[in-house]
Image: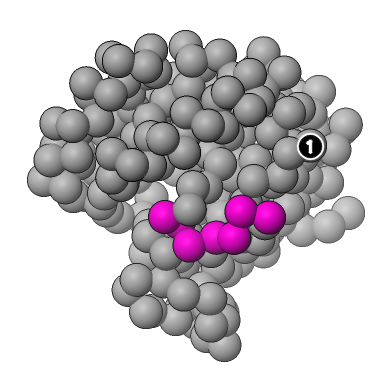
Amino acid sequence: MADLVLATDDTGDAEIFASLQGEGPSAGTPVAFIRLSRCNLACTWCDTAYTWRFEGDDRPHRDGIAFEKRANQVKLSPEKAAMKVAMLGQKRLVITGGEPLMQSGALADMLEHLPDIAVEIETNGTTKANAHLDIRVDQYNVSPKLAHSGNAAELALIPERLDAYAADPRAFFKFVVAAPSDVDEVLALVRAYAMVPARVFLMAEGTTSEALRERQKWLSPLCLKHGFRMSDRMHIHLYGDTRGT
């Protein structure tokens, strides 16, 4: 049985914590979080670059910081990770990253020990859960990466996967938007994959309340115009851009 590879919090322990979900359709819900390490994409504005941009990784990021892998990764058995989640006493679990579906097998093993918890997975939409994991998932928060993320479209926007998520009633789409022109790209994807607008969220890119509020001024009328939902980043307003929140 493979171990899970997790991100670390500021103490060096596994980043497993209780908080309010800050984004998307479950915003405001009390949940347990588990943050996994590693990602197959590299967004230039990623606010969890400590999960993938380790020393020796030359993929671009606007901050230019390379993190020491040993200090920012920790391995836990699925059983031990489940025990830490259970101790938080929450009814819902958000599995995030990095890209958590890179570790589908170990996640499925972990959830065997958490039979009564609702499961929400945050994914970039480029891969899929194996059958053993998928059967336990109640909600997918799919965040395809637009051109401004710095990822090549052939890596970030995989037609087979977008088709599958668009057809899955458990899936919601959450697009990170940095400029009004990004919404044109969203509209093209919504048309191409027949995404239901009511299941599409637009979320301003930003790691401060000031940046989010400034972008939301022009983002909110665009959501109204096109029938999309707007997601805030509540945790940023409450805790700032910090780990374990």
Q: Quadrant of the N terminus?
A: bottom right
**Of 82 and 238, the residue lying toward us:** 238
How many discs mark residues in the rendered view?
Answer: 1
Q: How is the image coloured?
A: one colour
Q: In the displayed structure, does residue 202 sit left or right of residue 103?
A: left
Q: Is residue 87 left or right of residue 64?
A: right
Identify which residue, 44 or 21, lies in the foreground. Answer: 44
The residue positioned 31% from the left and 20% from the top of the image is 223
Up/down of 52 relative to 208, above or below: below
- Residue at (24% x, 30% y) in the render: 219
Mark 1 — residue? 160
Amino acid at dot 1: Glu
User: Residue 47: x percent and y percent?
Assistant: 38, 57
Give percent across and percent down for residue 123: 60, 41
Please check the rendered image and state whether residue 151 is part of the magenta-colored stretch, yes or no: yes
Q: Is residue 35 above or below residue 134?
A: below
Visible residue check, residue 18: no
Q: Quadrant of residue 165?
A: top right
Indicate yes or no whether the magenta region holds residue 81.
no
| Residue at the image point whose x is 38% and y is 35% from the top | 183
**Residue 231 position in % (x across, y down):** 34, 27
Q: Name the quadrant of the C terminus.
A: top left
Task: Give the percent coordinates (x, y) of residue 105.
Answer: 83, 46
Q: Going by the image, does 230 lie left or right of 90?
A: left
Tell me, yes or no, if residue 150 can be seen here.
yes
Magenta-highlighted residues: 148-154
Check disc 1 and report its element: helix, strand or loop.
Answer: helix
